[in-house]
Image (cartoon, rainbow, N blue to C red):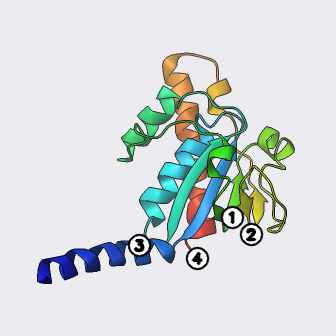
Amino acid sequence: MLIYFILNSRNMGTSMESQGKKKILFLCLHNSSRSQMAEGLLRAIYGDRYEAYSAGVETTTVNPNAIVVMKEIGIDILSQHSKTPQEFQDILFDMAVTVCDRAKVACPICSTNLELPTQFPKAREVIHESFEDPAAAVGSEEEILKIFRRVRDEIKDWISQTFGK
């Protein structure tokens, strides 16, 4: 009986912990670089306060360069995968963030009308913060990684300013 109580208490603590966190959805066109890095960064830096998710208007795969530059700062996004917003249609997000201009245009994806029936996720607030697409970079491997690092650092700084309050 005591063992059941202890295990049950642990489970309750985890779910109660999760219930207090705000849910944030990062959206970009392909869910391969910017939104994946944002998801990993928010989870790593402020995972005690936020549940981070990401999705793309179209899905592809997580860009290997995004995985490399995140690993350089000790964040492993290897297990993350590209997702569509429809996968989150039953979740009410506290905030949805479009991280590229094309996603903003293509995104009545997140509705702030919480009463409207939709196959897409809903969010109490939708904001836009555009970052350069590092996947579009051309040059040597080192030049491309340099752009990925810069975009990663810009996203990290923005996350600290926006969610670290």
User: Which residue is nearer to you in this view: 23 or 38?
Assistant: 23
* Residue holding disc 2: 124
Contact flag, marks 2 and 3 (Cβ < 8 Å) = no
Judged by depth in the image, the label closer to the viewer, 2 or 3, is 3
Q: Position of residue 10 (x, y in %)?
A: 27, 75
Query: Please, what is the three-letter code of the amino acid marked with disc 1?
Result: Met
Query: Please, what is the three-letter code of the amino acid marked with disc 3?
Result: Ser
Q: Distance between the Cα atoms at labels 2 and 3?
A: 22 Å
At x 45% / y 37%, what residue is drawn? 69
| 60 relative to 6 in the view: left or right | right
Contact flag, marks 2 and 1 (Cβ < 8 Å) = yes
Contact flag, marks 1 and 3 (Cβ < 8 Å) = no
- Report crowding for label 2: few under 14, some 14 to 19, many 20 or more residues within 10 A (C-alpha): some
| 140 relative to 76 in the view: left or right | right
Query: Please, what is the three-letter code of the amino acid marked with disc 2?
Result: Arg
At x 58% / y 76%, what residue is drawn? 165
Contact flag, marks 3 and 4 (Cβ < 8 Å) = no
Q: Distance between the Cα atoms at labels 1 and 4?
A: 15 Å
Judged by depth in the image, the label closer to the viewer, 1 or 3, is 3
* Residue holding disc 4: 165
Q: Secondary structure at mark 1?
A: strand
* Residue holding disc 1: 95
Q: Position of residue 149 (x, y in %)?
A: 52, 38
